[in-house]
Image (tube, rainbow, N blue to C red):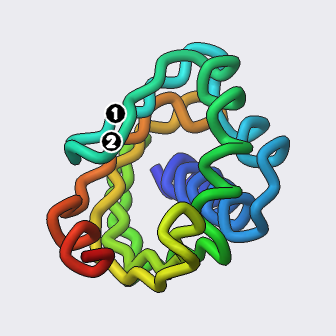
Amino acid sequence: MGFVLKDTRAAVEAYLAALNAHDAEAVAACVAEDFVNEHTSSMGQSRRGRAEYRAALTGFLENFGDLHYAPECFLVDGESAAVPYVMRFLMRSAGDRPVRVRGVFVFTVADGLIARRTDYWDSGEVQRQLA
């Protein structure tokens, strides 16, 4: 069981490091071909498949300037992981307004790749900070 836990955490850490490096190719390389990216927030856009996700990454990383996810902890159970985080970014489309929001990622990892990411965050909080 320890082997699976280590692989799950390593896959999630690699994914978050690629996001924090603003490297769209490295982010896409961390996800499975049939990756599901589910957003529960009204501001989020869910995506299916690595190709669709990769196509959206460049614009996302450009609009969310200086994006950084700071994990609070990693809760790993087999191929699943929950990661509460603090996300900080500059909203380029709002004149580089700084935003800080807390959320939780829930990941499913398969064969060393992120197969599913469900993202829980409060888009109302983002809107309040941009108002």
The kind of secondary structure element at disc 2 is: strand
Residue drawn at (66%, 77%) of the image: 66
The three-letter code of the residue at mark 1 reads: Glu
Residue at x 48%, y 69% (from the top left corner)? 94
As measured in the structure, the alpha-carbon distance from the residue carrying label 1 to the one carrying label 2 is 5 Å
Is 15 in front, or is 123?
A: 123
x%, y% of residue 54? 70, 30
Against 65, residue 106 (above or below) is above
**Which disc is residue 38 wearing?**
1
Q: Amino acid at mark 2?
A: Thr
User: Residue 7 or 126: which is nearer the viewer?
Assistant: 126
21 displayed left or right of 92: right
Disc 2: which residue: 118
**Residue pictured at 63% horizontal, 25% vertical:** 32
Q: How many dots with numbers?
A: 2
Say if 100 sits above or below 94 in the image.
below
With respect to residue 96, does 50 lie above or below? above
Earlier sequence position, callout 1 versus callout 2: 1
Residue 77: % across, % down: 33, 52
At 24% from the left edge and 54% from the top edge, which residue is drawn? 120
Q: Is residue 53 left or right of residue 85?
A: right
